[in-house]
Image (cartoon, rainbow, N blue to C red):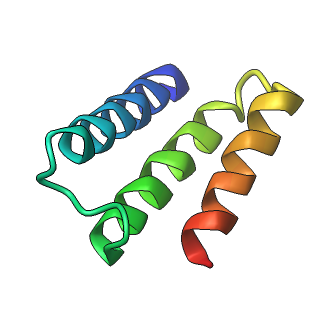
Amino acid sequence: MYQIVGVIGSIIVIYSYFMTAIHLLDPKSYKYNIINIIAALLMLISLYDEPNLGSIIIEGFLIIISII
């Protein structure tokens, strides 16, 4: 279950990166930040089963940066 949630989060990150790369998503938009927050939260949830401190720190900072 947790691994599926993490995979969905990863797919969302890839989608966000791709849409930004082809100039269909503005990296300064609220939509971009919301997408990244959702993806980071999903990946954090996936870490509940098998915690990894490095990944938790990265996802936490991605959420904080997206909120700022």
User: Residue 12: image x %, image y %?
Assistant: 32, 39
Question: What residue is rendered at 23% in x and 35% in y?
Answer: 18
In this rendering, position of residue 32 left or right of residue 53:
left
User: Residue 43: image x %, image y %?
Assistant: 56, 37
Question: What residue is rendered at 88% in x and 31% in y?
Answer: 53
Please name whichever residue, 41 or 31, is drawn nearer the observer in this view of the structure: 31
Please identify the quadrant where the C terminus is shown: bottom right
Name which quarter of the figure residue 21 lies in: top left
Name which quarter of the figure residue 7 lies in: top left
Question: What residue is rendered at 73% in x and 55% in y?
Answer: 61
User: Residue 28: image x %, image y %?
Assistant: 37, 70
Please name whichever residue, 3 or 28, is drawn nearer the observer in this view of the structure: 28
**Numbered label tally:** 0
In this rendering, position of residue 43 left or right of residue 24:
right
User: Residue 13: image x %, image y %?
Assistant: 39, 38
- Residue occupying the far right of the picture: 53
In this rendering, position of residue 16 left or right of residue 1:
left
